[in-house]
Structures are given as structure tokens and as C-alpha cells.
Image: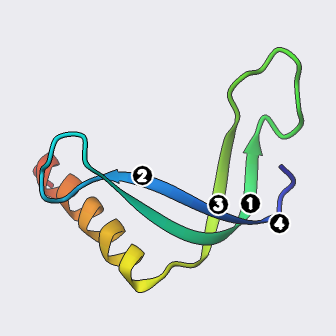
Amino acid sequence: MEPLTKVRMELLFPASDGSSGGEVRVGFDGIVVRTEPDAPTSNVSIYRMAVFFTHIPESSSKILSGFIESRIHASGA
């Protein structure tokens, strides 16, 4: 995917209520800023992509913030 491509994506996060197997979808809009490798290669099956978030709905932002905070507290930081 070319840099500066607009994307609409969803990420899945574990449910905050601790239910086993429960997931919450978080949607957002963004722009691709980097891909690795930067061009299709026949011997590569995994690509990495960095996306700059341009719009995150408030409900998605709260879920994302809660997830990050739970990881910070779990690490003892």
C-alpha cells in the first residue's frame, strides 16, 4: 500500500469486562505513512504498516485509551 493512502480500519481489543473470548471493535480513519517492505516482494508474506490516525470516534477513543491504560498498569509502570 502506498504512503499517503487513506484507509478505514478496525482493530479488535479484548473486552474490558474480562469475559473470555469477548472482543470489542474499534474503528478509525487514517493515512498510511510507511510500509515494510516498501514494495511487494515475492518471497515476503508479512508486511508491516504504520498508520497515522486522522479520525477516531469518541467511543473508539475511550476503548483505545482504556486498553492502553490497562497495559500500563499491568506492566507496573
Q: Name the residue under label 3.
A: 51
Residue contact at pointers 4 and 3, CB within 8 angstroms: no
Q: Nearer the viewer, residue 16 or 36?
A: 16
Image disc number at residue 12: 2
Q: How many angstroms separate mark 4 from mark 3 (CA)?
A: 9 Å
Question: For residue 4, which quarter of the picture?
Answer: bottom right
Q: Mark 1 or mark 4: name the one nearer the start of the chain.
A: 4
Q: Residue at x 68, y 27 (%)?
A: 46
| First along the sequence among labels 3 and 1 | 1
Residue 63 in picture, x, y percent from top left: 31, 69
Residue drawn where x is 82% and y is 14% of the image: 43
Residue type, label 3: Val
Q: Residue 4 carries which label?
A: 4
- Label 1 crowd (10 A; few <14 / some 14-19 / many >=20): some
Do the CB atoms of the residues marked 1 and 4 lie less than 8 Å apart?
yes
User: Which residue has dot 1 on it?
Assistant: 33
Q: What residue type is labelled 1?
A: Val
Q: Position of residue 10 (x, y in %)?
A: 54, 59
Q: Which of marks 2 and 1 is in front?
A: 2
Q: What element carries label 1?
A: strand
CA–CA distance between discs 2 and 4? Answer: 24 Å
Q: What residue type is labelled 4?
A: Leu
Dot 3 or dot 2: first in sequence order is: 2
Q: Which of marks 2 and 4 is in front?
A: 2
Secondary-structure class at tag 4: loop
- Disc 2 is placed on an element classified as strand
Dot 3 falls on a residue whose secondary structure is strand
